[in-house]
Image: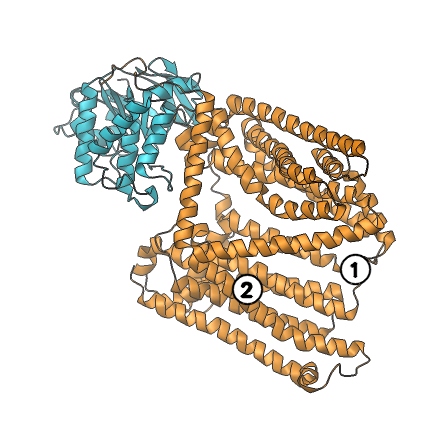
Amino acid sequence: MPGRGAISESCRAIPLEAESRLFWWLRATIAWETLRSMLQGARLRLTLVSLLSLVFWGSLYGLFTEGFTFLDSIHAEVISLLFNAFFSSLLLMLVLSTGILLYGSMYCSREARLLLTLPVRPEAIFAHKFQEAMWFSSWGFVLLGSPMLTAYGVVRGAPWTFYVLLLPFMVAFVVIPATLGGILCMALVAWLGRLRVYALSIAAAAGCAALAWLGWSLFRSGPVDGTSAEWFERIFLKLGVMEQRFLPSWWLSTGLIEAARTSPRPEVRVAALVEAAKFLALLLSNGLMLQVIAAWLARATYRMGYSQLAGEVPSRRQQARGGWFDELLSNCGSAAGRPLRLLLVKDLRLFRRDIAQWSQFVIFFGLLGIYFLNLRSFHYNNTYASMISFLNLAVAGLILSTFTTRFIFPMISLEGRRFWILGLLPVHRDQIVMSKFVFALVGGLPACCGLVLLSDSMLGIPRTLILVHELCCVVLCFGLSGIAVGLGARMPDLRESSPAKISSGFGGTLCLVLSSLYIMAVVIVAAVPTHIAVAAQAFGGRPVTSGFIGWLGGPQGTAASLLLVAILGVVGTAVPLELGRRAFRRLEL
Amino acid sequence: MIEFDHVSRTYGAKTAVSDLSLAIPRGELFALLGPNGAGKTTTIKMLVGLLRPSRGAVRVCGCDVVKDPRGAHLHTGYVPDEPTLYDKLTGREFLRFIADMFGMPRHLAVRNIDREIENFELAEFADELAESYSLGMKQRLVFAASLLHDPAVLVLDEPMVGLDPRSVKIVKDLIRARTQEGMIVFMSTHTLAMAEELADRVGIMVRGDLRFLGTLDELRGQVALETTSLEHLYLRITASPQDGDGTGGAARGA
């Protein structure tokens, strides 16, 4: 045994490079094990994700090819504006998302607590968590940006060097906002302490106000024809504010445009390539400079910031908010229904206090609401309006299905560890399942119905069609809640405590797939007769065709389709719910 | 070897640790006792560098934990109250990661990993992913990791939580053996029997104050009670003024 007092002979401080290598080894081992366990236990999910990604990539590539071909034929210079608008928006989003991810992983995670008790440099911990956060926040950019830029290269007939430079350009660009996010995060925690929430709120409010101003200024002169040259010019004049030479987004877009430049003269091609390389160097050097600043900041403030944050006393007052509503809900109604209401109140409290849940709910439905609010500006004709209204219905359903899969499906599994509480109460297990169903339904129904109503109002849809949409929406909410709760009770994972892991397992994937199929079935069954009827109106009320299709477009066909939608709703709700209830009754905990 | 020099730590308006001065020499097993919220975990977190003192300084083997955290960490092994592992690493991989972080030469790392796997009877599951471990298995692995680099100071925060009786015996024997070799053990616990059995000195904290510091015999000498069990002495010292006769106040100046 080595002597004590001085540092034992068995250990010594290791250089920074060795620390970085160790973290690389750690990430590589974890990534490999994760992939291996996915290949063994979640093949369906992996296959679905890969296939859907490929389909998504291909569709985007096709869409962008069409778009660039169209733009190239009218206003080639517009592409530069488009790139600038896209990359500068991305710049802002990457700053925020990396900052938020780093806040969670550097200051609130158990891994950070472990690493801070080891003889590791704070800048090495920052670099480790930064690389993780950068990957998580920018994979969307790779998925969206790669088909877009490839399509651009193909349309412009770019040289092979353009495709070689794509990845270095994307990586060099992403490093800048991601590092800025990290710097902001560390600075906020270290120097603004308790004010960080206010600082972030003010920044978010300013961002929203800027976006709102941009949106308002684009549409303030009333309805526009979205395909006119005048509208295009107005839009791009406004977007010109994003074309600033000091922004990395401008360096990226200009570099890419230079890299894609073609010319029969070799000296022009070489000059363009050199110009592109200069912009790449500009991006790289700035990224590296920011990395140096971030490493210095981590060395100076990380441990201090962690200590400050760990020393904050959480406010208990906020958690008591909404108590009067809980009391009201618990006490109204019959005594027989009280256990169900108490379970509902418990789930409502958990939902209210979990910012991750309600903030995502608000953000996604809020964004959808903003999109719906802008529909009026586009003046669609009746046929388009009908089609878009059904597409909007499907989108609202799809967003709801992601929430039911992510938050409702794991609810029964999460009760597993707390089952000693529920198991000892005089509550029938069916009531536990039903409480989850009612919770999901009550949460989703007003949001979806409200959004569909908003979409229809903005599109100027007739009242009868609005009723059809609202009926479909109710059917979707019932069915999606039934599928999520039923499958959650049928395939619970009682050992897992992370809702994210539960929803990403086989049961969660199946829930998402079944929910998507259910939405497609309901929307198609309701939309086809309506669309035929609208098309008939466009032809002066004459039937578009005779036979079954003609009958389908008539009043009887519409009634039959609505009946079928109702049947789909009953089956989609009752069958999974009943299966889940039976399985949950038999479940041994 | 461990020094708390007039250390205070506040959380907003609340003082978690107040003017703590304490020195623990090598080869001593020190048990920090106190009711929930007394400031034990805050003290331990300051010792391992997770929290900074609002005032004063904490030193481990002469290294200031705030000014030279890496130096202090090289001397320290830490077993937290909740074991933290990487789910997708095996036990052996986790031990290798820790050994490499402490800069242990490869041959020594391999030797010490094998030694700790044997000491804590981890061989059966050392090559399985940590996600499949029970709480007790995780705790044993964290113990093994904390002792890999033969630290001069071992910090234990509620070390026996989740351990079965056999594991408790293994840990107790190891702690005894290591302290005899000169290692300092700084332990926070609610298990009074273990403190009574193992500790050379105990400190009793109440609401951030160190109410008593000394050996059990000194404690018995200060608190005039018929019984000599640590449990009764502890309850007397930690009693609030409304509960008792204020004997705690008599011990405060220790």
* Residue A199 screen position, x and y as percent: 62, 35
From what the image shows, is residue B196 above or below residue A565?
Answer: above
* Residue A354 screen position, x and y as percent: 49, 48
Q: Name the foreground residue: B217 vs A497.
A: A497
Q: Sequence-wise, which precedes: disc 2 or disc 1?
A: 1
Q: For the N terminus of chain B, give its image quadrant.
A: top left
The answer to whether residue B193 is left or right of residue A268 is left
The answer to whether residue A380 is left or right of residue B149 is right
Residue furthest to the left in view is B226
What's the mark number on residue A516?
2
Rendered residue at 48%/67% (across/down):
A482
Q: Which residue is mark 1?
A: A378
Q: Name the foreground residue: B112 vs A393.
A: B112
Element carrying mark 1? helix
- Colour that chain B carries in the picture: cyan
Rendered residue at 30%/19% (across/down):
A10
Q: Quadrant of residue B248?
A: top left
The answer to whether residue A365 is left or right of residue A86 is left
Q: For the C terminus of chain B, give its image quadrant.
A: top left
Amino acid type for the residue under numbered disc 2? Ser
Q: Quadrant of residue A431?
A: bottom left
* Residue A276 screen position, x and y as percent: 72, 32
